[in-house]
Image (cartoon, rainbow, N blue to C red):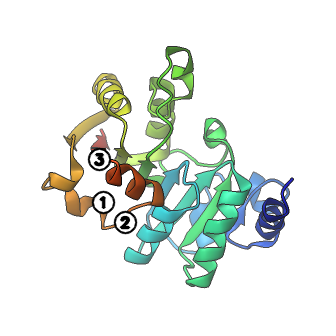
Amino acid sequence: MARRKLHHYKFSEQAENVVQVGKPLYSEVKGNWNKLYFNNESPIVVELACGKGEYTIGLGKKFPEKNFIGVDIKGDRIARGSALATEQNLSNVAFLRAGIQYSQEFFGEGELSEIWLIHPDPQVRDRNEKYRLTNPSFLAKYAGFLKEGGMFFLKTDSDFLYEYTLQTLAEAPNFRIIEHTYDLYQSHLLDEHHGVRTHYEGIFTAKGYTIKYIKAELV
C-alpha cells in the first residue's frame, strides 16, 4: 500500500468526524445520527459516493443549519474530506466509510431530508445495471431513508445516466420528478447547485460536457 494512502487510513481511524468499522458508532448510528453524532435535531443531508467530500463540505459551509454526511467506501478519499472539514471547523459535517449497497445498515426509516448523487459512475454496460446508483433497487432504498417530502438530487455529465434515471424515477412508485435539465449551467435551475462544483465537474465542463440535473421528491 502506498505510504500516502496508509497515512490517510490511519487519519480516518483517529478522526472524530469519520464513522467506520472498528468505531462504536458504526454499529449504533442507524436511526440515531441526530442523537449520537450531531447532538441536534437539524435536517440530515447525505451525499452518496462522495469521493473527497467536495460537495458535502461545500453544502455544509453554505447551510450551517443542516447536518451533512458524505458516504464512500474509499478510505483515502474519506480521509481527505475529513481533514478539510476539520480544518474548516465544520461540526455539521460527518463522513461514513461504507458501501452504498449496505446503506440500510446505517440509516433509519425517514431519517434523511435530502440525498445527493454527484457524478456517480454511470455503469453503462447492461451487465452492470445492478451497480447503477439510480437503479430501481437503490431508489427503493433511498425512499425508505427519506422523510415524506424528502428530496433526491442527481448531477451527472453522463447523457446515459441522465436518461436512465429519468426513466427509473418516472417508474418508481415513491418518487415524483419535479424538475430536470440537460444543461444546468444554461438553465434557470443553476442556483440550485449552490455554486458548488467538484474537481471532476470542472474537468467535464472544460471538455465540453453539459451537466445534467434532476430533482425529485418522495411522495
Residue extending farthest to the left is: 188
Kindly report the distance in space between the C-alpha atoms of the residues bearing marks 1 and 3. Answer: 19 Å
* Image position of 193 (left or right of 143): left
| Alpha carbon distance from label 2 to label 1 | 6 Å
Labelled pair 2, 1 in contact (Cβ < 8 Å): yes
Bin the neighbour count of mark 3 within 10 Å (Cα to Cα): few under 14, some 14-19, many 20 and up. Answer: few
Residue placed farthest to the top in the image? 127
Q: Residue at x 55, y 21 (%)?
A: 128
Residue at 75% of width from left, 60% of height from top? Answer: 25
Which one is earlier in the sequence, the residue at label 1 or at label 3? 1
Residues marked 1 and 3 touching at CB (< 8 Å): no
Residue 51, above or below 135: below
> Which mark, residue 196?
2
- The kind of secondary structure element at disc 3 is loop
Residue for badge 3? 208
**Amino acid type of the residue that numbered disc 2 sits on in the rendered structure:** Val
Query: Could you say where residue 167 lies in the image, as x and y percent from the top left?
Result: 30, 24
**Is 45 in front, or is 159?**
159
What's under tag 1, amino acid-wise? His
Q: Which residue is mark 1?
A: 193
Counting from the top left corner in percent of width and height, residue 35 is at 61, 67
Mark 3 residue type: Gly
In which quadrant of the rendered view does residue 217 lie? top left
- Please tell me whether residue 18 is drawn above or below residue 123 in the rendered image: below
User: Residue 52: horizontal and vertical position, in percent?
Assistant: 58, 60
Q: Residues within 10 Å of mark 1 (few under 14, many from 20)?
A: some
Residue 60 visible (yes or no): yes
Instruction: Please state the horizontal and vertical placement of residue 177, each as a whole percent of the image.
Output: 24, 37
